[in-house]
Amino acid sequence: MSTDLTPHDALHRDLVRWGLAAFFACAGYLSAVIFERPVFLYFPMIGEWHWAVPLTTPAEALGPPIAFYGWKALGVLCALGAWLMPARWLLRLPACTGFVAVCLSIAAMLLYEARGLFAL
Amino acid sequence: MMMFALLLHALCAIFLLGAISHQAASTWRSEGGRTQTLTASFARVRGALYARAVIVAYVLTVLLGDVVYGPYRVDVKTMLFDLQLMGWNSAFEIKEHLVAFGLYLLPLYWLLWRISPLDYAGLRRGVTSMLALIVWYALIVGHLLNNIKGVGFQ
């Protein structure tokens, strides 16, 4: 299939794919934040990493956990989903699809975090 | 050691802010018009030359931010909770999320700056401007949080 593509079509396919990869990553990251499901947790006081799937309540003795690294890792894993999409689907979508979806993810994240922000 | 990492993180962020601001401004520049003004000079850069530097600075800033995040979680975030400064905590969490989203946009950004400037100019402008907004927000909030309590100080 890819050998039949013109250079312009190949570029369009790549732009849509990388845009969707960014969106899948943002969506995965945001889901992990909202549903509190990081891939792993890091406990900086004792310097230990713990798998967070299945999620277990961290013991007090371990100190405060960091979920941020686990959220980012989950986002990267979700981005791989963009490579499961066939090229013919990607060619039908506008090049800006992924970027627009990322902007909507940012809006959703801001809405989610706005609860605490107004406590400034 | 952490103070040094935080300083390096800040310096990388300032470099990134300058580069991405020039580049984003260049995508909004209209051809022709007056070129002698300060704003025209600010935008009159060859944006494509900045792309690699922006990516290196962005990734380096994120990595250094990840290094200082551990002490931040233990010392600063705990203090924010203790003092009920929940708004500042949320402002910083938004920064974390935005920076991660920006990181995910970098491959698309890189691809957009490798192609002809005439192709997909609107998308290039949108992605670059979004990254610039993210960097501006991150630097301002990071600076304000550092004013409340910096990493490495007891």
Image (cartoon, coloured by chain):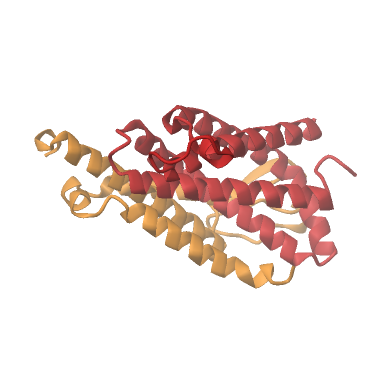
Chain colours: A orange, B red
Residue B53 is situated, as x and y percent measured from the top left of the image, at 52, 28
In the picture shown, does residue A109 fall above or below B68?
below
Residue B76 is situated, as x and y percent measured from the top left of the image, at 80, 51
Quadrant of the image occupied by residue A4: top left
Q: Count the labels in the image.
A: 0
Q: Residue at x 49, y 30 (%)?
A: B50
In the picture shown, does residue B27 fall above or below B57?
below
Residue B110 is situated, as x and y percent measured from the top left of the image, at 40, 35
- Seen from the viewer's position, the closer of residues B115 and A103 is B115
Q: Residue furthest left?
A: A4
- Seen from the viewer's position, the closer of residues A3 and B143 is B143
Can you see residue A69?
Answer: no
- Left/right placement of residue A93 relative to residue A65 reads left
Screen quadrant of the N terminus of chain B: top right
Residue B3 is situated, as x and y percent measured from the top left of the image, at 80, 34
- Left/right placement of residue A32 relative to residue B116 reads right
Q: Residue at x 73, y 71 (%)?
A: A119
Can you see residue B71?
Answer: yes
